[in-house]
Amino acid sequence: MKRYIIAAIALCMMATSCDDFLSRQNPNAIESEYFFTDESSLNLYTNGLLRTYSTKLIDFINGDRYADTQNWDGEYLYYTDRYEVKDYTSWSWTALRSINYYLESMRQAQAEESILNHYEGVGRVFRALFYFDKIQAFGAVPYYDFVIDDANTEALYKDRDARSYVFEKVFEDIDYACDNCLTTGKFVDSRTLINKYVALALKARMCLFEGTYRKYHTVDPSTGVAWTAEEKAQGEKYLKECADACEKLIASGAFSLYPKYREMFNQGGGTSNCASEFIWARDYDTELAVNNTSYSINDYMINAQHAQYSFNRDFVMTYLCTDGTPFTSKYSGDKYYEVSFADECKGRDARLAGTIRTPGFTRDGGKVRYAPDLVYAKTGYQPCKWLTDDLGRDEINAATDTDVPLIRYAEVLLAYAEAKAELGECTQAVWDKTIKPLRERGGVKSIYPTEADPYLVNYFLNTVTDPVILEVRRERGVELTMENQRQRDIRRWHLGELLVKPKTGIWIPALETPMDLDGDGKNDNVVSSTKTEAAGLKVLTVNYNGSTKSGAGHILSEGDHGYIITSTTLCDGYKWEEKKYVYPIPLSSVTLNSNLTQNYGWEE
């Protein structure tokens, strides 16, 4: 860990003078011929870049904060019709200059050719990640694979390159890394460095994204123009490349599923304890003071002053029963909405109890029971996935050392299943080595699907009826929730409307009537339209019969009883538009560079 801190400082020294136009004179404190001398110097430089692309835990969790799976936590301006081009300001290119500088200079180091090829692959992984982020945000962007001289105004002030061109460059970089990065112990064992396995997993993620994006979007969102035949064909190629990368990872035998789901997210030492499943991770260590501080992760999971994470009931309904059948299939019509919280948690996929507080949830080695807290979790589905067992780390600034599994082997299995399903090739054999082991880890019987689940068809807005694709999507949502994936998935599937639908919660039999959500025989919560506090109880205030005590507009579906519908005053103003699949190019950048075209629909 100490070497990462030193490397991060070194990278900051090298990058501080960069501006967002990738130019200026050489900003590096040490000239490349003196800095890049041997393998250790390559390792030092790339470790600095590593910290930039190893997502922090809180950012990792917050990636899904405004997805369809979770409840609103305050207003999200982007979902309103008040959002304007001037509201988006992120357009940083500083990291790219550091990456391109490295790639242009690193072969001055004296090392074996295989080592140089490996470290070039590492640099190209970072460039692929840089542009993959840009493609997800903006679609078409200017592409540069060299350090721009400040006199090169043609390059500095050019228009954007086509999305298809930029992604093909991303593909070339990640493909090179897959062919040339090494798998020797010093690059693999820590689970924190870039190696061939990481490159293959990233290739699968990137190719799945772009392949499905071009299948489910009829037009390039940057231009509003339909994909060309070549671009559509490229999309199918990327799905095949995704499957190929996954097959290589699976065949390597280097990884397997860790047997206990929740343990991967609530303990320190994940990079060693869960190394069988972690392909790439960010390592935290309290002894070296490399940890999660500011607000501790525990604090974020329990303190309503700092966060209010909770799950949407529509998503919770997708968790299967242990017999392998949909929970919703047990009831006629939509009567499943009237099931009590205790009953809906019975006989379900064990990952539900590993994700939310269910009746009997405990901490401190099983000594203390905790009920869902309706003050914190407005829907009643309170996350526990990232909450550690240690009560001593609940204070606001208590350090936690939970490692971040940036890529797990489970994601590779899911990517393989999805790519093969989209290609019409997810046979029973593919299912049995991908979805089957994931479900069995959750205590769920594996059943190869032959008929579409009506609930899933409706959930995904009647855009997909293929039973295998639907079940793979179900599995992906359940397995990877709160892991910075869902927003990306919803956007590539062209389901932005899901992001602005009202969010629902648990069934409430009656207003003003205390409830026992923990199942220990003691009342712990109440929903009220007349009060905000009650002795010994957590109170969710809703509006009913003229009451306006809930400023956010929480209500019950039937007025004085029913399932919770949260934040109606917020979501009533939410609207999804086609242009929102990509963000606007910041107004300041378009003003400065008159050649830079704006994304379709965002023109002013």
Image (tube, helix red, strand yellow):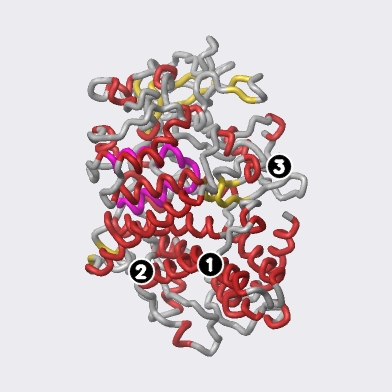
Distance CA(mark 1)–CA(mark 2): 26 Å
Q: Quadrant of residue 479?
A: top left
**Residues packed near mark 1 inside 10 Å, few (<14), some (14 to 19) or many (20 plus):** many
Distance CA(mark 3)–CA(mark 2): 41 Å
Mark linked to residue 399:
3
Q: Main secondary structure of the magenta part?
A: helix
> What residue type is disc 2 on?
Arg
Q: At 58% from the left edge and 16% from the top edge, which residue is drawn?
A: 535
Disc 1: which residue? 180
Residue at disc 1, secondary structure = helix
Residue at disc 3, secondary structure = loop
What is the magenta range? 468-494
Mark linked to residue 111:
none
Distance CA(mark 1)–CA(mark 3): 38 Å
Q: At 39% from the left edge and 67% from the top edge, which residue is drawn?
A: 167
> What residue type is disc 3 on?
Ala
Instruction: Choose between 137 and 413: the one closer to the eye.
Output: 413
| Quarter of the figure with the C terminus | bottom left
Q: At 32% from the left edge and 69% from the top edge, which residue is drawn?
A: 603
- Please state which of the two labelled residues, at mark 3 or mark 2, is closer to the viewer: 2
- Please state which of the two labelled residues, at mark 1 or mark 3, is closer to the viewer: 1
Mark linked to residue 163:
2
